[in-house]
Image: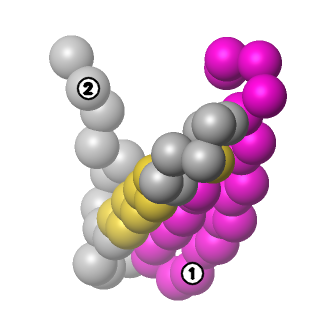
Amino acid sequence: MPAGWKVGDKTGNGGYGTRNDIGIIRPDGGRAPVVIAVLTDRGKPGVPSRTTP
């Protein structure tokens, strides 16, 4: 992370493999913050986790 930047995040989870993460990156120098949100859900019990090749 570049010097002077600030980062914050919050994670969460729920039933059946639901995972959520939201973060904010605040660059220095008065530039606009960047907000990132990732939401995933397997949808039903027993479904294997998805993997990346």
Relative image position of residue 7 (x, y in whole percent)? 71, 45
Q: Position of residue 8 (x, y in %)?
A: 73, 54
Asked if disc 1 and disc 2 are in contact, CB closer than 8 Å, the reply is no
Which residue has dot 1 on it?
14
In the displayed structure, 53 sits above or below 29; it is: above
Residue 50 sits above or below residue 40 on the image: above
Whether the magenta-drawn stretch holds residue 16 is answered as yes
On the image, the x and y values in percent for residue 5 come to: 71, 34
Classify 5 as above or below 44. above
Q: Helix, strand, or loop for circle 1?
A: loop
Q: In terms of image quadrants, where is residue 46?
A: bottom left
Indicate the colouring scheme.
secondary structure
Q: Nearer the viewer, residue 19 or 2?
A: 2
- When asked about the image quadrant of residue 29, the answer is top right
Q: Residues within 10 Å of mark 1 (few under 14, many from 20)?
A: few
Identify the element where label 2 is drawn: loop
Q: Quadrant of the N terminus?
A: top right
Q: Name the disc covering residue 30, or none.
A: none
Q: Residue at x 28, y 78 (%)?
A: 43
Q: Between residues 32 and 43, which one lies in front from this camera angle?
A: 32
Q: Nearer the viewer, residue 6 or 48?
A: 6
Q: Would residue 51 be counted in the magenta stretch?
A: no
Q: Is residue 53 left or right of residue 19?
A: left
Q: Name the residue tied to disc 2.
A: 52
Q: Earlier in the sequence, mark 1 or mark 2?
A: 1
Q: Which quadrant would residue 4 be assigned to in this image?
A: top right
Residue drawn 66% across the image and 64% down it: 11
Along the line of sight, the residue nearer the viewer: 21 or 35: 35
- Label 2 sits on what residue type? Thr
Give the magenta range. Answer: 1-25
Q: Quadrant of the C terminus?
A: top left
